[in-house]
Amino acid sequence: MGAALGLAALTFAVCYLRGFVLPHSPLLFWGDQPGFATKGARMLAGELPYRDFFEFLTPGTDLVYAGLFRIFGILPWLPNLVMDCLAAYTAWLMTYCAARIVRGPLVALPAILLTGFVLYGSLDATHHWFSTALIMTAVAVLMRSSSQFRITLAAFSIGMATSFTQTKGVATAAGLVIFLVWQSIHEGQSHAQLRRRVWLFLGVSTISFFALNLPFVLAAGPVNWINQVFVFPVLYFGSASANNLQGTWPQFRDSANIVKWLCFPFLYIGVPLIYAAFFLRMRQRLKTDPDESWDRLLLIAIVGVAMLAVMIPALSIRRVSCASPPAMILLAWQLSHLGRLRRAIPIALGAISCLIAVGEIYAVQFHPKPRISLPRGSFVLPDAKNYELYRWSADHTRPGQWFFGFTVLDLPLGVRNPTPLEALGPGEYTRPEQVTAMIAALERARPPLLILPQLVVHPESPGRKTDNLEPFRDYLRQHYHQVKVFYGGFEAWQRVGP
């Protein structure tokens, strides 16, 4: 327990030093977390997902941020601190689980790999890490035994995980059912005992899921909720290149950090190989090595494969990272069986991971970065090229003003989005009915300023329909004119007339 707490504290410190310039100046990250935090602020103002604004995920992340903002106020740096806590808790869980299958210094290896390799491209407090932490909680609960009490706790945790990422929650629920079936057969339990365990798990996880989600379902209407949470992810989510396998290469290509040559192969190649190697080893040794903790190992492996499999259609560095904690635990176990190499390889991997973490910290703490004062506080900008965007936007808006276009500006500037959409997407991602609703909202609120990506304003192939945004472009040209172009291809459009 002491080692787990120490590694959790270390992970918290690493994340804090990557998200805050000492002593306490927060970085303004882009990523996905500003969008979820903005939705939390909208909930705090009385709006609800599915009813008042579009949300294709279950509402857990929005709800957490709404609760935190209610307690502490709307602080744009809170997501940075949330990520620190999520990473520390995940490190604790990984160490707790590792201690049940390995002994000695190898217990610390999974958490050390988390601080460097895993968190390299995933320091983003979104539904991915919330659901991973809850799923790993269920794994930790079941590591000791599968008593009815522990199955109940694990099922509750999976129900909550599904309330953050519905696909990952359902996949791991299916994986845990498979595990319970295998365990019951392996232990020679009766069919009646198996049915009771499975129905207990499914019943509690379903009840806990709807206990959190039902108020939102009723507020928005079941049809609206189903369309956003189930139909949209299946039919339209992948139409944006960032949400399918085409987005993996640009992530690697656009990263200027040399560490990518270590982290990308480790995660994209290493994680699947770790799972494959485990199942091969289990098949070979299950009968010849009955004293091994096969039930615990299989529990970790099944959950890891379930999390990874559901992410494959859109396997970004963030998603593969959030699906990798079980693989890090299995890697420690596999390395414990390497004979002479059992010390050298873990030491090398741990040292490289620590160097990655130190390098990321050094880049934040010692590379000069611009500081900027905005309506909701003073911040540090990770990229100096974006200073003009923030400074100009702050000078041309006021807190409480209607504004649309670039979500990362909403919280630090204190502006409000009058539309049901956080942003516009390419291809079929933004639906025609959403464009219609957004134009109607813009016409009602008439925000004086929009800041938009060039792809939204200018279609990829003029004269050929590549998305559903042409009605918006027509509205934009009729009521706004371009006044500024920023680094990164963002354009400021000011309203013409009233």
Image: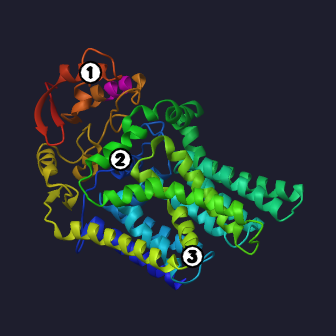
Tell which tag, 1 or 2, sits nearer the viewer. Answer: 1
Task: Give the spatial CA distance, label 1 vs label 3.
Answer: 55 Å
Residue type for callout 1: Ser
Provide the secondary structure element on which disc 1 rests.
loop
Q: Mark 1 or mark 3: which comes first in sequence?
A: 3
Are dots 1 and 3 in contact, CB under 8 Å? no
Image point (44%, 53%), residue name:
268
* Residue 454 rendering spot, x and y as whole percentages: 21, 32
* Residue 14 rendering spot, x and y as whole percentages: 34, 72
Residue identifier under label 3:
336
Residue 228 sits above or below residue 117 on the image = above
Q: Is residue 209 left or right of residue 80?
A: right
Q: Quadrant of the C terminus?
A: top left
Q: Quadrant of the N terminus?
A: bottom right
Residue 343 sits above or below residue 268 on the image = below
Residue identifier under label 1:
461
